Image: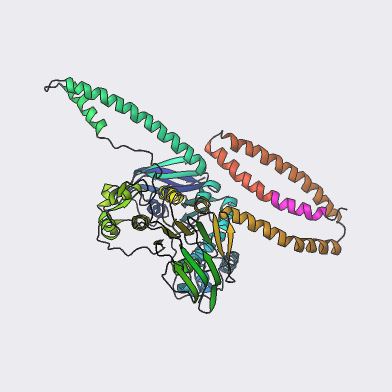
Amino acid sequence: MNLISADQISKSTSDKNLFLNISFGINDGDKTALIGINGSGKSTLLKIICKMEEPDSGTVTLNNSLRMKFVEQSPHFDQDLTIEETVISLCETSPDRENRIRKIQAVLDELNAGDLSQIIRNLSGGNRKKIAIADAFSSDTDLLVLDEPTNHLDLSTIVWMEKKLRRRSQAILLVTHDRYFLENVVNSIYELDHETLYRYEGNYDRYLEQKNEKYELMNEMEQKKMQFLKKEMEWLKRQPKARGTKQKARTDRIEEIAGRKKISNPASLEFSVSGRRLGKRILEIKNISKSFSNKLLFGGFSYTFRGQERIGIVGPNGSGKSTLLNIIAGKILSDTGDVISGLNTHIGYFDQLGESMNQDEKTLDFIKNHAGQKIAMPDGSVLTASRMLEMFNFNSRMQNMQIKKLSGGEKRRLNLVYILMKNPNFLILDEPTNDLDLATLTVLEDLIERFPGCVLIVSHDRYFMDRTVDYLFTLSDDGKIEGYPGNYSDYLFYREISENKSAEPERNIKKKQKINEKNKLSFKEKRELENLENEIDSLEKEKERLMNILNSGDGNHEVLSDSGIRHQEIETLLEEKLLRWEFLSSFEN
């Protein structure tokens, strides 16, 4: 069933075209991502789809029975209400009001949103986002629209959301830079690129393959055009000034090819900042602690940084991750202990707020005036401010644009260039992936890999953390900070093993209790056990058949989409039936 159909829609701002005459559709069960560089119009397109904005031209048609829910990047609630009052207000028009309230509260409990009597204005951005997510995930919808759903959320909530989205059979449309979502959740990707919308079948890995194939084809066509242009230019030089109609048409064609807009494959960043030389002492933390409103965030933490460390910081929303960074950077003081920085240690702090900018200043002028006109490279060469901006996707037009005309993501990207141009040797990044596009994230990951100093990162982006860090500080609600070697996936694996080991004795006790309470099956349960064995066998065979279809890539989009949805349903069913079979089997002997 078609849910949304967009036909030849266009949208422009006062400075540029966002997209021109694009058409697309979203069907029941589609799991689609919308990607593109900052400022390409992703959020605007979502708002047009949700009828919150109108296109300049073209039409968007919604199915008459469509039930849709939209979660914005930064949800807005009445600042003076409590969480509980906010939940009640969200359900005011619901026909099953009490049931809806209970559902939302149950999801908030799953997300560890805390005391429902908390006032909205006192909540972190992550906990406000949890309210919007709980509202959306407890609603009966045909289409869930999510704009950067992972922004401001802690990693455990993001993992929870990914599992929910993977199991969801209804349609999803999301703007995200979370590459694990793109890899594990979606089955198609739309990309806004140079005012046009391109569709790619499959997940993120398949998108990268198809995009590479596309640019290889474009490069071949470019080479052929250049060869043609070279021959035509030679012909043009040989011609007399007086030309006939045919010669004029041929000349016009040459000029058209020579003056066309060229689209090239954006290459990854092939440079690293040189960084000031680090001294013998880099940075030392001695027994620091911090409390707010009588709540201990962390206490008794000590650490000595060594050269070229790559450390990530993880923990639930409100556990004090940003506070720890601010103490290390000297922005705020700890309650106890000391932070001792080396004489040659120069911190570059890319925080969530960003540098205060004169909105009337031009992009290039801001970098030159506040960060410098050039930066030294490790090989002794010099990189100008303009060239540095180009490497972070600021073309000449954008470099001469006033800051106030940039999108939120473009301002974040500009602030990143500012930090790097100041040539730090200790880089602190607080949620660096928020509002940054995939191209910029790749650039930043490559830069961190080559960075000659220390790097300290707070991020909810698992893919980014896996690529950039090799050690973790983990913050917990009881005020402890512990260290784990490895990246975030390593930590998750370690935590899962630990939890399984600690839960094993409890599971064995409960199992023995059940066996003691009931030592044989009823006739009905014996029949159920026999049927379960047949059902599990049948589901396993269907799962194998669907995997063959998905791995082959044959068939049209609908077949592959339906197979993917059914495969997810079977995995859930198998899990339930195997648990029931295991329980009933324990009474057989």
Of residues 32 and 99, the one drawn nearer to the viewer in this rendering: 32
Residue 548 falls inside the magenta stretch? no
Q: Residue 503 at x, y = what percent?
A: 72, 61
Residue 371 shown left or right of residue 508 in the figure: left
Q: Residue 444 at x, y = what percent?
A: 42, 51
Q: Residue 474 at x, y = what percent?
A: 56, 63
Q: Residue 98 at x, y = what percent?
A: 58, 69
Q: Quadrant of residue 276?
A: bottom left
The residue stretch that appears in magenta? 574-589
**Residue ID at (63%, 54%):** 493
**Residue ID at (36%, 29%):** 221
Coloration of the structure image: rainbow
Residue 578 falls inside the magenta stretch? yes
Residue with the most extreme left position: 242
Q: Is residue 477 visible?
A: yes
Up the image or down, 328 lies above or below 218; here it is below
Q: Please, what is the dominant secondary structure of the magenta stretch? A: helix
Of residues 69 and 520, the one drawn nearer to the viewer in this rendering: 520
Q: Is residue 29 visible?
A: no
Residue with the most extreme front position: 280
Residue with the most extreme bottom position: 294
Up the image or down, 551 lies above or below 295; here it is above
Residue 440 shown left or right of residue 473 in the figure: left
**Residue ID at (38%, 54%):** 275
Residue 134 shown left or right of residue 219 in the figure: right
